[in-house]
Image (cartoon, helix red, strand yellow):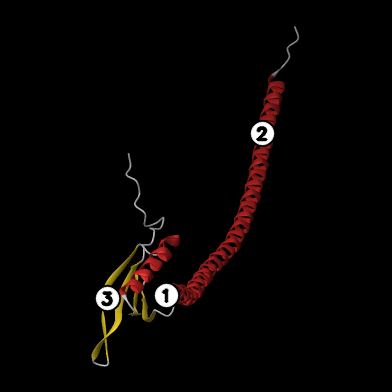
Amino acid sequence: MIRINLLPFRAARKQENVRQQISVFGLSFLLLLALLYLGNTFLSRSVSAMQSEKAHVEAELKKKEGIANEVRSMQEHLKMVQVRIDAINVLRAGRDYPVHLLDDITGLVVPKRMWLTSLDNTPQNLEITGFAIDNNTVAQFLKNLETYGAKDNRFSSVDLMQVVKSRRGGTYSELKEFRIICQKPAPAPTAEAAPKPPKK
C-alpha cells in the first residue's frame, strides 16, 4: 500500500491562500486610498470653484450696489430739480396773477363815474376801496364784480362793507367812499388731505 504525505501540499496551499488574502487586502487598501484621493481632489476642486463663484458674486453685488447708490443719488437730485421747477412755475404764475387781476378789475370800473384807490389781495379775499359819484355807481360796480366772480368760481361772495360820504379837505363832499370785500373760495383738498372713507 502506497502512502502519500499531504502535509507539504496543505501547507503550500495554506500559504497560497494567505498570500492571496494579503494581495486582496493590499489591493483593497490601495483602491481605498485612490478613492479617498480622488474624492478629496473632487471636493477640493468643488470648494475652489464655489469660492471663486462666491468671490465673483460678491464683486458683482458690490458693483450693483454702487450702481444702485448712483441711481438713488440721481433720483434724489431729480426730486430736488423737480421741486425747484415747481417753485419756479408757482412764482411765474404768481407773478402774472396780480397784473391780470388789476387789468380785470380795472375793466369792471364804471367809466368816468368812479375810481379805485387800493386793491389788497390775500389768499382768502380781495379788498377794494375807492370813490364813486353816487350809490348807483357803487351798485353797478358790485354787480360787475359779482358777474366777474361767478365766472370760473373766482369769488364765493362779494360784500359791500362800507359806503360813506367822502370827507376831503376837511369837508364832506358828494362823493361816496366805499370798501368791498370779495371772498375767495376755499382751495379744494388734495388727495393726501382728503378724508379716507371708513373701513367696513
* Of residues 85 and 122, the one drawn nearer to the viewer in this rendering: 122
Which of 41/72 is in front? 72
Can you give x and y, in whole percent of width and height, for residue 178 in the image? 30, 77
The picture places residue 125, in percent across and down from the top left corner, at: 34, 70
Whole-percent x and y of residue 108?
43, 72
Disc 2: which residue: 22
Residue density around tag 2, few if under 14, some if 14–19, many if 20 or more, within 10 Å: few
Residue 186 drawn above or below residue 103 = above
Q: Mark 3 points at which residue?
A: 163
**Disc 3 and disc 2: Cα gap in Å?**
132 Å
User: Which labelled disc corresponds to residue 109?
Assistant: 1
Mark 3 or mark 1: name the one nearer the start of the chain: 1
Q: Which amino acid does label 1 sit on?
A: Val
Quadrant into which the N terminus falls: top right
SS label for mark 2: helix
In this rendering, which labeled residue sits more in front, label 1 or label 2? 1
Quadrant housing residue 194: bottom left
The span from disc 1 to disc 2 (Cα, nearest Å) is: 128 Å
